[in-house]
Amino acid sequence: MNDPAGQAATERFRLVVVSGGTSDPSSTRLLADRIASRTGELAADRGESVEVGVIDLRSLASEIATAIVSQHIGPGLTRAVELLGAADGIVASAPVYKAAPSGLFSSFFHVLDNDLLIAKPVVLAATAGTARHALVVDEQMRSLFAYMRTLTAPTSVFAASEDWNDKALGGHVERAAIELLLLMESGFARQIRDESWKSYQHEYGSAGGTELDIDLSSDLMRLATGGKSVPRQR
Amino acid sequence: MQFGIFSVSDITRDPVSGETPSEAERIKAIVQIAKKTEEVGLDVFAIGEHHNPPFFSSSPTTLLANIAALTSRLLLTTSTTLITTNDPVRIAEEYAMLQHLAGGRMDLMLGRGNTAPVYPWFGQDIRKGLPLALENYNLLHRLWREDVVDWEGEFRTALQGFTSTPRPLDDVPPFVWHGSIRTPEIAEQAAFYGNGFFANHIFWPTSHSLRLIEFYRQRFEHYGHGTQKQAVVGLGGQTYIAKNSQDAFKEYRPYFDEAPVYGHGPSLEDFSSQTPLSVGSPQEVIEKTLTFHDAFGDYQRQMFLIDHAGLPLKAVLNQLDLLGEEVVPVLRKELASRRDPESADAPTHQGLVRAKYGDEPARQPRPNANRGDNVTGASPYQDSDASAEYPKLV
């Protein structure tokens, strides 16, 4: 697919699937895979390619629990953070058991640095045993990702048991996939990184250990070096 | 290179015996531990500062003064002194007093404290913790170096013509370490003033502590205090030693599993392979500790956490025996052979006195007789600059 002139014309996107499914095979993972593979097909049609990495939270369950109670980040979780930090797009898929994304799924995102996913395109997906959980994706998962400052695709995908043999699900997957691809193509996340990264809140060592810039001209740095703090507001 | 132990002063139930020591027992025990630290040939003892149960150490200078009176060689310090919730004027006074009583065998490490409810008990707000720490140290630094201080800041009432007494021993301020895990501003402040920088090095992998230490070294050189190698770095660490590896894991496991902060979290195996914790035989602990030198280069002080998580006094004293007999002597030899002669010496009062005065006698301030201005006088001591000006109070 390289352009004959030899210029690197192939856009290659790194897509990461995060699945909170716990069985094997898991319908939560299956739903995420459908979105990811459809995104890959659409990309191929346009002379682009998508490389998919998968984070199965089931295998990280004890590391996630450990991180929640002790801030100790194990090697599997470290690898997951690296994958997400390098991702151009994400499909985040959660099982719903009790009117909320599963605790495992939520906990994983709770231990990530606040700035790890800034401006990254995300498709949200969820599975459940009943359609009564349908609004969990848009009412709960979307707000979690708003907090993480992701660029969440307009279409999210929900599949209750009865949806698996409904053509409509395929339509939702299709819509979400094209949205995700267009958002990745836009280069929005990269541009935010280049042009506006500093305007978000960071801590030293955040963004998965990549945020190591130190602003020596800040008010606090002036105070650290014997200067006055910001004048008191009266 | 100095070796020592640091305690956070937790009073924790012993998960093996089920007993929780009383405050009285724990306070008596800590004095015994400090004395033993000197007996086994270690150099430094540090105590933390906390203002809530289950900790006993609200008043570190009182404890350290008592230990100073019972020891002759041990260097006493803190881990940490709260530079946020303590008035820097009180820190200046209390630690200068300790410095006199301990004959200079002391320094202190400053930290912020991360328990939000403690701040308002002392009229402060954790959300202002960082600027508070930075500004308070700026004042503390001057109180120990200028006989008479005029000062105005955001967090404390202004001072006019204030003299912190007693003046530091030999008019040489106590050495200060700034402790931080991930705050570049604290490393910058340590570098700006040419003070020491301490990485707690307990919970996070060595690579994590390394970034801020490298930044501190660069900035230390930038501010003209010496080369990067001459910056003064201290490291924490924690250890549990037994004659062989299996016994070390077996004996330590129940305490690790229920330890405050990381208990009920990672497995002992994971935590000891992924963080600076070393559990094992003396040889294994020696090898792991030497990897710190591989990562950080020469550093001046290595502290071990061995007194915590409900470990009984007997076990702590036994750890000190093993450290003193089998681990630290080997580490001293190994690290001395690796040491670059350019590296800074470990900070001591004698070293600081020599640096300031050479062979000249040290200044010994003697107050002037009261001239009616002893509260706000500009020249409180007989050798104060006679032309010192009175502060303008308008």
Image (cartoon, coloured by chain):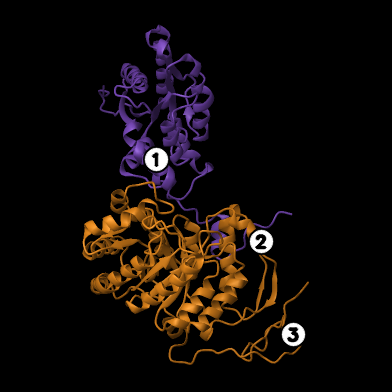
Kindly indicate whether the residue at mark 1 contacts the one at mark 3 (C-beta within 8 angstroms).
Answer: no
Q: Are marks 1 and 2 on the same chain?
A: no
| Distance (Cα) linking label 3 and label 1 | 63 Å
Q: Which chain is purple?
A: A
Residue B10, image x and y in percent? 46, 61
Kindly indicate whether the residue at mark 2 contacts the one at mark 3 (C-beta within 8 angstroms).
Answer: no
Instruction: Identify the residue under disc 2.
Output: B154
Amino acid bearing label 3: Asp
Identify the image quadrant of residue A190.
top left
Amino acid bearing label 1: Ala
Q: Which quadrant: the C terminus of chain A?
A: bottom right
Instruction: Identify the residue under disc 1.
Output: A65
Residue B373's disc number: 3
Classify mark 1: residues with Cα within 10 Å, few (<14), some (14-19) or many (20+): many
Residue B276 vs residue B119: left or right? left
Q: Are marks 3 and 1 on the same chain?
A: no
| Distance (Cα) linking label 1 and label 2 | 41 Å
At 47% from the left and 61% from the top, the residue drawn is B11
Query: Front-most of B297 and B199?
Result: B199
B155 shown above or below A72 = below
Q: Secondary structure at mark 1?
A: helix
Amino acid bearing label 2: Glu
Q: Secondary structure at mark 2?
A: loop
| Distance (Cα) linking label 3 and label 2 | 27 Å
Reading the chain from its start, which is encountered first: label 3 or label 2?
2
Which subunit holds the residue at mark 2?
A: B
Q: Secondary structure at mark 3?
A: loop
Q: Which chain is orange?
A: B
Which subunit holds the residue at mark 1?
A: A
Residue B260, image x and y in percent? 43, 53
Query: Front-most of A179 and B110?
Result: B110
